[in-house]
Image: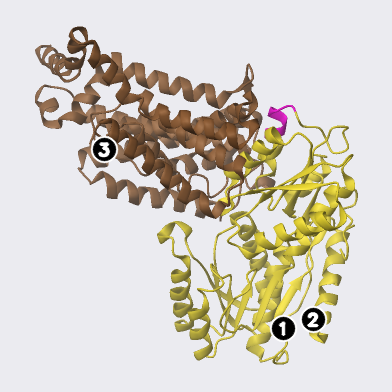
Amino acid sequence: MQQRAMADKAIEQATSVGWRMNRRDIRFVILKWFRELTLIPVIVVLMIAGAIVNPVFFTPSNLINVAEGGAALGMVVVAESLILLTGKFDISLQGTFGLAPLLGAWLIAPKASQGLGTEWNPWLGLLVVLGVGLAVGAFNGILVVKANFNAFIFTLAMSILLTGLQLGWLGGQTVYNLPQAFIYLGSESWVGIPVAVWITVVAFAAAALFLRYHRAGRAMYAIGGNLEAARAAGIQVDRIRIGVFMVASVLAAVGGLMQAGRVTAVTAGQGSNLIFGVFAAAVIGGISLDGGRGRMVGALTGVVLLSLVTNILTLTNISSTWIDAVDGAIILIALGLAKLIGTERA
Amino acid sequence: MSTLFGRRVRALSAVVGTALLAVGCGGSPTPSGSTTPKIGVVLTYNLPGFWGNYFKYEDQYRTQLGVEIVGPKVANVEANGNEAAQQILDVRSLIAQGVQALIINPADSAAIGPALDYAKRKGVPVVTVDVARSQGSVYMIVRADNTAYGTKSCDYIASHATSPGTIAMVEGDLTSLNARDRATGCQAVISQKYPNFKVQAYQTKDWGTDPAVQNATTALTAITDLRGIYVHWSVPEDGIIAAEKQKNKYSDVGGSNHIMLVGNDGSPHECDLIRSKNLDATIDQPADKYAYYAIFYAKQAVAGTKYNDGQTTDHNIDPILLVPRAGRGSGPGG
């Protein structure tokens, strides 16, 4: 009981300094928001560029395309941001993003479309997807946190393993003919907006509220800021960090399900190279690679920016051999701008 | 390709083509074999669905043709981003294992050069599949006429569309000669034969499924007089159909406002889509014939059969247009 009170106090100290200052200094509030929203000017510039490039850009239909294009990426960005806040890494999220839906689809698809032939109920398939996410997350979390493996190299190895399993399991075949329940997330709309977009927005909002108001959420900042201090204060750092790994992997699996639903198939290459975009979105959105700093609203602007870039490049018909170069340049510009405005970033 | 040999091969492939049509989508030539040469296989995985099919047929034909297959060694795209270097190592290790011939799908048509040189020094003949080499010598190149893919696909869309307008072409990775040839074929036929049509091209890096679907989705939004979508390969088709449905722009083949969709590959799933009136047509990328001819020529190479020097080593398989109703070809020379 006493320990818990101590932990609460530590969390309070780690996170409330800014809030006490708020009341005193209105400039601090502005600065704080400014810091999270440094990408807004870049996004505005991009939108103007988009409108000039192609009048179609500002149609609702195209803006929905932008949102939908970023939805699956967004789920993984939420996941990675949570882990980054606690001061860890997970590169294997892209492996989970591909493997989890592939295994689920394999169990429910008929043999003719590369399934196992067991043709399980799609809901069971969905449980398998989430289960794979949970299992991979628990495995990563326990070995990185408890056994103290280096998070970078361990999850890198896991990523290669998961991607390899994804390729080897079905010999590179694509699983298709997936039942409606399985592809629902990626293929249906609510009030004209794709379900995937709703879910991603909800995930961002839920993560933001959790970090802001829940005890464990605020403890994550304390852990990422100073692990030993957090431990000394009685925060159950290991339990929280393992839990974050598990939640993140499940979110990545759901992201993979969204993408599978959108293309109504699971390919052996799903998720490959996704993680670069994930880190880019999180970091330009202000999530610190060192842990303990950054907010979800910032990460969201990172996702919006990357998705806008993709959409505008498609509308301009720029040669695909140049897309990576343009992508990289825009990320660098965003980083430079953040530096210029004075927020310290990775 | 005007040589005697070229014609003979084309005649052979035409026979195979007919057999293929008879069973609609699928079917295979039936050869015979005697000795068991040892053949090493080095592939990439740039198009997982296609190569997955290829493996199935390779398995089938190795028993039919009576050869022993070592491998396939597959250069892992994820491993280090340098598949070409990996393939050179693979070739060396297979030759060390004593293979008598090699079947290679080069990751890069130029960077495979050193591997080909090495094989030549060791006296091991090489058959390349799907990709031509730009340097080094090979015994035979088994690839399809990819320009014809583009020509037949876009000709089909323009000749069957209800009114003139724009065709969106979702291109594969243009670093591959195959995608470039398909793009060229489509653009050429439209500009020569159909002045009322326009082609709007969208490029897709690394043959990515999701980017391809995104490209098609953008086309659905951005092009007001969209009459058809030509996608260079089959995997994104389901996603494109789903995107059309989501945007309320979908109707079955033959519907009044139908946006045509033509893909390339000729996979069994595409045949299902054609039967269920979701897909207008596809071009058969005959994984079975690739596998068959690759093994066939590797075996010929081991047996020492000479296809006279100085003539082309291209074995161009003529692709076949698969359309609804009995899957009969209607493209030029189909």
**Gap in Å between the C-alphas at discs 1 and 2?**
8 Å
Circle 3 residue: A88
Circle 2 residue: B6
Chain B drawn in what color?
yellow
Residue occupying the point 53% across, 21% down: A198
Query: Mark 2 packing: few (<14 Cα in 10 Å), some, or many (20+)?
Result: some
Kind of element beneath mark 2: helix
Q: Is residue A160 left or right of residue A185?
A: left
Chain A drawn in what color?
brown
Chain part drawn in magenta:
B242-248
Residue occupying the point 36% across, 31% down: A285
**Gap in Å between the C-alphas at discs 1 and 3?**
57 Å
Locate the C terminus of chain A by quadrant.
Answer: top left
Mark sitting on residue B312:
1
Q: Which amino acid, by three-letter code, is at mark 2?
A: Gly
In the displayed structure, would residue B160 be above or below residue A204? below
Evaluate whether label 2 is on the same chain as label 3: no
> Is B243 covered by the magenta stretch?
yes
